[in-house]
Each structure stands twice: as structure tokens, then as C-alpha cells.
């Protein structure tokens, strides 16, 4: 099934005062343009600025967006209809980032930490997950969410688990001093609102990962936030953490959107810290799963994760998008007792939070989706006109 969406479905609950920027594909321009939302209309900003990475560097971004003159591309409702078609029709929404690196943090919540350890010990076999889950709870004891990564308490727990033979590489990044930061996807490869996300055809155990994504400039300043789906192949990564690239980076395996909401007097990093991120999965088999991820339970502060990504050790001259991680690791049985959750093709995934709106995508196979063909060379040719 294809989602039918209206502007009300995907915009923040206070959209009238939100600074929203995004990208739209225009056939008549043979490429993407930057847009903002004004009174339900999408306004083309390309006469003023047409590179999202440049826009996020501007100190006068609020004034620029408010005063920029540009062509109306029509109502957001009409573009959403185009965006949800298969194939999509122009003009349609794209992921709001362009040349920024796309990075992601893993194991930033205690719940997801336990599930990563289960994947590892199960060797990618979903049938063993339930038994391992109970065993780990007995061994670890206590509440991992109360432990600050890198603290003396965390290091004492590490020593105890090592003595029991229960230590894991996922424990290392979950409660150790160093966060897991990996490359999720390539610049210009993420899909946006309404597009299908892709699963590698070899995967039989997988799930969405609903996350908040920070938009960070080249100096390491978080300039805004959006939503993302860090599509995860549990069986592939479970076989070996060295398969992380195969598990995470495939055609259409990264969705970001619908818009970047810029930080201002009405929306700040504190709103990210306190956000409740909701997930809804609707299947053609009448399956329904609803859950939430509470950002207040994150083990590392979002700005600490930014600091572990960029600094003297690593620069990002075009800025980067940073997935902050999720506490969502679905264990609800779908195909039979003890089988847990995995996607079915055609699932519709909705990721939402009131201050950022909603990102909606359909699930398909990565090898059956339109190939990624619009890369940096095509983008540069479009910029040069």
C-alpha cells in the first residue's frame, strides 16, 4: 500500500512558527532546489541559495528564509501526493540534505545495546533471540540506562562482565568512553518523504530504526534537526560486526526528512533532548506495531555525540547529518511464536515527533528500487547550470 498524506500529517504541530527547509526535485530544472514552507506552500529558494550545506553555514538564515523571493511550487499537499506515487512524480520531496556526510551513532540506548549483543550472540539467527534475551538479563542485572558511559561504575561493570565471559564489542561502545560513530550512507544517496526504503535481498531479520538526525555545520555547530530511518539488517550485522557496511548502506536504506527544522527561539537542542519519537508500522497482512523512543533515556548527550564525530581528529568541510540512535529494537512476534519482528515488503513506516512532524516511507527490496544515479558529478553539473 502507498501512504496518502496531507501537510497536516507531516508538519510539526507548531508549523506556523517553525523554520523549515528542504529539497524538491524539479524536472524543469533537471535537478533539486532548496525550498521553505510558507502558509502551506513550498517556496523555491534557488534564486537566493541552492546548497543546503551553504544555507546551514549562514548566521542570517532566519532572515534569509523570511525575505527570500521565490517561485511557489504549489501546495505541500500536492507535492506529497507526487512524493507518495510509485514511481514518484515531479515535483516531489527529497531528503533535505545534499553534500553533507551522513553519519550515525549506534548503541546509544540501553535497550538497543542489549539487542545488539543478542544479535551478536545469536549469529543472526532470530529464533535464538528470546532465550538469549532472558539469559543476558540474568547475567547483567540492574538497569544499564542508569550507567553513564565511561564512568567508574561502567568500567567496574565491564570488568565484572569480562570475568563472566559476557563482554561484547557492543558493550564497549554502549558503556565505554567512546561512542560508535559510523558512515550510514553517501552524500546525495538518502531518500526522502514518501519514497520507498530498501532492504538487502539477502536479509530475513530486519527492522526500521526511528531516530532524530542533527544537521551540523562545518564548525561542528548543530543548526537544526530532522527525522531519519536508519534501516537495520539484524541478521547481517549479527553474523559479524565487520558486515556493518553491508547491513547499513544499501540502495535506499537511509531515509531523512521531511524537512530540517532550524534551531531558533522556538526550537532548540533541548527540544531534541526531551523528544518522544513515535514509530508506527502497518503491514499488508494487517500487522500493526506502535512504539516510542524517549530521547531522555539516551546514554550520551546529543552534543557529546557531535563532539565525538567532529573535532581536531576529524573535520567535515561540508558539514554532516548525524543520526543519534534509537531505543527501538522490536521483539513483537509477527510470523510465529519466538520469531520476533521482521519487515514484510509493503510495510508502511511512520516516524514522528510533534516538533519535527512525520517521515513516512514504504518498505521494498533495495535491488528492486530505482538505482541511485544522481551523485556528486550530476549535482555539480546542475549547480553550474
Image (cartoon, helix red, strand yellow):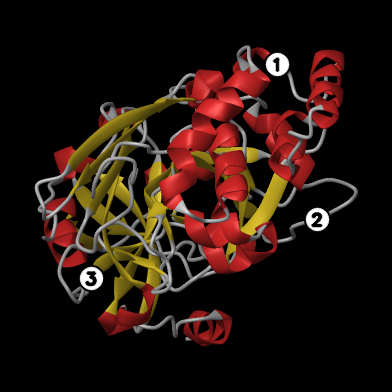
Q: Position of residue 378 (x, y in %)?
A: 50, 86
Residue drawn at the location 34% of the way across and 41% of the way down: 338
Q: Nearer the viewer, mark 1 or mark 3?
A: 1
Check residue 147 in the rendering and tell me which mark sits there, or answer none: 1
Question: Residue 362 is drawn in which quadrant?
Answer: bottom left
Q: Is 210 left, or right, of 41 in this rendering? A: right
231 lies above or below 26: above
Residue drawn at the location 35% of the way across and 84% of the way down: 30
Q: Position of residue 143 (x, y in %)?
A: 60, 14
Residue 21 makes an appearance in the image? yes
Residue nearer the viewer, 155 or 216: 155
Dot 1, how many residues are within 10 Å of its Cα: few (below 14), some (14-19), or many (20+)? some
Disc 1 to disc 3, how far (Cα)? 48 Å
377 lies above or below 271: below
Q: Which residue is mark 2?
A: 315
Residue drawn at the location 57% of the way across and 22% of the way down: 137
Q: Which residue is mark 3?
A: 91
Amino acid at each position: 500500500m502507498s501512504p496518502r498524506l496531507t501537510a497536516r500529517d507531516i508538519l510539526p504541530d507548531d508549523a506556523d512558527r517553525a523554520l523549515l527547509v528542504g529539497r524538491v526535485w524539479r524536472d524543469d530544472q533537471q535537478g533539486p532546489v532548496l525550498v521553505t514552507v510558507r502558509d502551506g506552500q513550498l517556496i523555491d529558494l534557488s534564486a537566493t541559495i541552492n546548497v543546503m550545506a551553504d544555507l546551514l553555514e549562514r548566521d542570517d538564515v532566519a532572515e534569509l528564509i523570511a525575505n527570500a523571493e521565490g517561485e511557489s511550487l504549489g501546495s505541500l499537499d500536492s507535492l506529497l501526493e507526487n512524493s507518495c506515487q510509485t514511481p514518484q512524480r515531479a515535483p516531489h520531496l527529497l531528503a533535505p540534505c545534499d553534500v553533507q556526510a551522513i553519519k550515525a551513532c549506534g548503541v546509544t540506548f540501553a535497550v538497543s545495546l542489549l539487542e545488539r549483543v543478542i544479535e551478536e550472540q545469536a549469529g543472526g539467527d532470530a529464533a535464538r533471540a528470546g532465550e538469549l534475551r532472558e539469559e543476558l538479563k540474568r547475567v547483567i542485572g540492574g538497569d544499564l540506562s542508569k550507567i553513564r558511559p565511561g564512568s567508574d561504575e561502567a568500567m567496574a561493570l565491564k570488568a565484572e562482565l569480562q570475568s563472566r565471559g559476557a563482554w561484547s564489542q557492543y558493550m564497549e561502545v554502549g558503556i565505554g568512553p567512546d561512542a560508535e560513530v559510523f558512515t550510514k550512507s553517501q552524500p546525495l544517496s538518502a531518500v526522502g518523504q514518501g519514497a520507498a526504503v530498501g532492504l538487502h535481498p539477502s536479509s530475513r531479520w530486519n527492522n526500521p530504526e526511528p531516530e532524530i538526525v542533527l544537521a551540523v555545520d562545518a564548525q561542528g555547530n548543530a543548526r537544526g534537526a530532522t527525522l531519519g530511518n536508519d534501516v537495520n539488517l539484524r541478521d547481517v550485522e549479527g553474523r559479524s560486526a565487520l558486515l556493518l557496511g553491508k547491513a547499513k548502506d544499501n540502495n535506499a536504506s537511509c531515509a531523512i526528512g521531511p524537512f530540517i527544522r532550524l534551531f531558533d527561539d522556538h526550537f532548540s537542542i533541548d527540544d531534541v533532548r526531551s523528544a518522544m519519537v513515535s514509530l508506527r508500522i502497518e503491514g499488508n497482512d494487517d500487522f500493526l506495531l506502535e512504539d516510542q523512543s524517549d530521547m531522555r533515556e539516551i546514554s550520551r548527550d546529543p552534543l557529546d555525540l557531535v563532539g565525538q564525530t567532529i573535532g581536531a581528529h576529524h573535520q567535515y568541510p561540508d558539514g554532516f547529518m548525524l543520526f543519534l540512535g534509537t531505543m527501538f529494537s522490536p521483539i513483537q512476534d509477527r510470523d510465529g511464536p519466538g520469531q520476533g519482528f521482521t519487515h514484510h515488503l509493503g510495510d508502511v513506516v511512520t516516524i514522528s515527533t510533534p516538533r519535527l512532524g512525520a517521515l513516512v516511507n514504504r518498505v521494498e527490496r533495495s535491488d528492486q528500487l530505482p538505482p541511485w544515479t544522481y551523485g556528486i558529478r550530476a549535482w555539480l553539473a546542475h549547480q553550474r547550470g
